[in-house]
Amino acid sequence: MKFRRKDFFKAIALGTISMPFLLRSVLSDTKAQGKSANVSGRTYNWKMVTTWPPNFPILGEACQAYADMVEKMSGGRMNIQVYGGGELVPALECFDTVRSGAAEIGSGAAYYWAGKTPAAQFFASVPFGMNAQQVTAWIYDGGGMELWEELYAKYSLIPMLGGNTGVQMGGWFNKEINTIEDFKGLKMRIPGLGGKVLEKAGGAPVLLAGGEIYTGLERGIIDATEWLGPYHDTQMGFDDIARYYYSPGWHEPGTALEYIFNKEKFESLPPDLQAILRTASYYINNWVMARMEARNAATLAKLKDKGVEIRTFSPEILEQLRKHTNEVIADITAKDAFARKVYESYNDFRQKASAYANITERLFYSSIQAI
Amino acid sequence: MKFRRKDFFKAIALGTISMPFLLRSVLSDTKAQGKSANVSGRTYNWKMVTTWPPNFPILGEACQAYADMVEKMSGGRMNIQVYGGGELVPALECFDTVRSGAAEIGSGAAYYWAGKTPAAQFFASVPFGMNAQQVTAWIYDGGGMELWEELYAKYSLIPMLGGNTGVQMGGWFNKEINTIEDFKGLKMRIPGLGGKVLEKAGGAPVLLAGGEIYTGLERGIIDATEWLGPYHDTQMGFDDIARYYYSPGWHEPGTALEYIFNKEKFESLPPDLQAILRTASYYINNWVMARMEARNAATLAKLKDKGVEIRTFSPEILEQLRKHTNEVIADITAKDAFARKVYESYNDFRQKASAYANITERLFYSSIQAI
């Protein structure tokens, strides 16, 4: 929609503003008379399978908050039973479980499905990619959602955004990382694209499930690990057994979380319940982002008192890792046409958002050091 | 909630995870049998008065999007008629109109009500204050909402968050601003706290309604004006008549928008419709933020082609303006106890969020220059 100042203020000046107002009043009355409330009393008992450990802070809790809000909004007509990873099916079977309709809803992050379709991971997180504000804008208003829906429709799924972790931390180390050479031979728990980048830098990404990381790091099976941010990391106890806490989380600058719905089941719902399930995902998107920001900040304040050494990767290290990231992404987009299409949209948005951030958010954050 | 890694992974290891699962399954069945859907068929026709010009891009359009989504979710039981500023009551009478119950909902920004209660403005924007991500986290999970509700309850209102503009631009000028001295005698359209800060810097803030700014700037009645960001500013035509476009918008680093509800009317609604109205505000919060980010970025890309000179205020200028801001805030909090209480919460959250951002978002935005 394009309009000019001249047009809409002219309308006010000329008094024509009363016309649409009158018209709308008339239309509104007609509408109110011609339509009656249309709510079916039928109740639905749905299942949500999740990739999160049971009661996992914020990310798992959000699923219950989603279910609770949907129940309230629907007046009890839509009841969602939430299952932690492994309770009903293993965490990484959520995609197939919802696809088959054995559960109607799933909660996770799109990069878990990279093995099924490499394009999926661009809807979760890209090393040196967009942050929460940018990726949310791309998905909701920059063409991202349309591509995401197109991709998931191939699997009979509908995706919705369900939160974002914000810029994560770079991980816990027991030795200093002063140059890119320090990654050589480093055994680090870092999954996904970040792991591939580490590999290109000469490191050894190690796959460990959440429950194995603490012991692995304590016993020296791994030299380092990333997880999320201060709030989650300290609940894992990493601050007790690692000396250095590095930032930023170059590998996950703003990981988007998702809800997935069985397409057929979702579309068979009455329109009001469909709208309720959709809107609840926006509620959770805010709910998660606010908690990540507030609780990570509060925990960091305590961590500093505890004596953990917080370090930042040097610009030179980040530059090298960025180069390796570009190689990894080039590999993916060369092999898969849909991944290429998604990344082109992602990258085009990122270029524009970065130019804008360069004169707005970047200057804002530069100035916070003076506080 | 505090739990340790040891506890929850121990639960998985020991296989006790099946216990809550079983328990919950049993409870769930009981719940489903004991409860029936509880939705009243009664319809409501409510009015939303707004501070925005009719069909104002994004901010005004969001109100209609809110009404549409509420209608969908409620299956037509809640119909909201949206009025632009001046259509039903003048823009700045929204607060009193909703307070009296003559309209049930209002849309605006809390700083419009600074004359009624100075604490209100801290829920909208503070010069050199928090940005969108931070202020949203403070309101939703940092104690801000509780204070906002406490304040507005005195006026029989309930506040909800309804979007954020993001970091705004610093405004349009026809002369360069190279030192703080260049603000001396400058006639600039800049309302609110920003205007007070300009005044302390020797400038002359001028009050002009939206419809008068273009002509005022064209005819030299004002030397400069701020508005929002590239998307809105170019629709006002400022790029045709001003030479320099300055950043950042130090006076509005992340202006939160609000919905206000008549408390008695809201609380008289059935619980499902209350939940629907609440959740819809979260939907709009995302809706607005995504559009502001995406469309400002897209417009900026075009603006650069057009030859507008984009400048940034120097760190020295910003430092001076920040000092004046602290004086202005000290004046407000010295005179009003509730404003002091709100600002203490705001500032405490900001300190923690800034320390966290310093090792996350700041580093992220520093690195975008390399893209």
Image (cartoon, coloured by chain):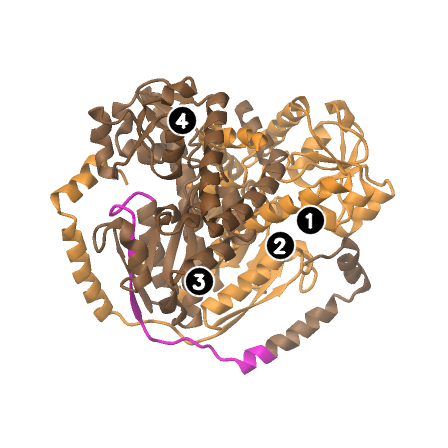
Chain colours: A brown, B orange
Q: CA distance from mark 4 to mark 3?
A: 50 Å
Secondary structure at badge 4 equals loop
Q: Do the residues at pointers 1 and 4 share their chain? A: no
Residue B70 located left or right of residue B294? left
Q: CA distance from mark 4 to mark 2?
A: 45 Å
Residue A131: x and y in percent read 49, 39
What is the crowding at mark 2: few (fewer than 14 residues within 10 Å), some, or many (at least 20)? many
Q: Which residue lies at the image location 54% right of the left edge and 38% below the top edge?
A: B131
Chain containing the residue with disc 1? B
In the rendered image, which quarter is residue A269 located in?
bottom left
Q: Which residue is mark 4?
A: A201
Instruction: Find out whether the residues at labels 1 and 3 contact each other: C-beta distance under 8 Å.
Output: no
Instruction: Find out whether the residues at labels 1 and 4 contact each other: C-beta distance under 8 Å.
Output: no
Q: Which residue lies at the image location 22% right of the left edge and 50% below the top edge?
A: A86
Residue B159: x and y in percent read 50, 52
- Magenta stretch: give its range: A30-58
Residue B58, labelled with which disc? 2
Q: Which residue is mark 3?
A: B276
Residue B53: x and y in percent read 69, 57
Q: CA distance from mark 2 to mark 1?
A: 9 Å
Q: In this view of the protein, which residue sits in the foreground, B223 or B358?
A: B358
Secondary structure at badge 2 equals loop
Instruction: Find out whether the residues at labels 4 and 3 contact each other: C-beta distance under 8 Å.
Output: no
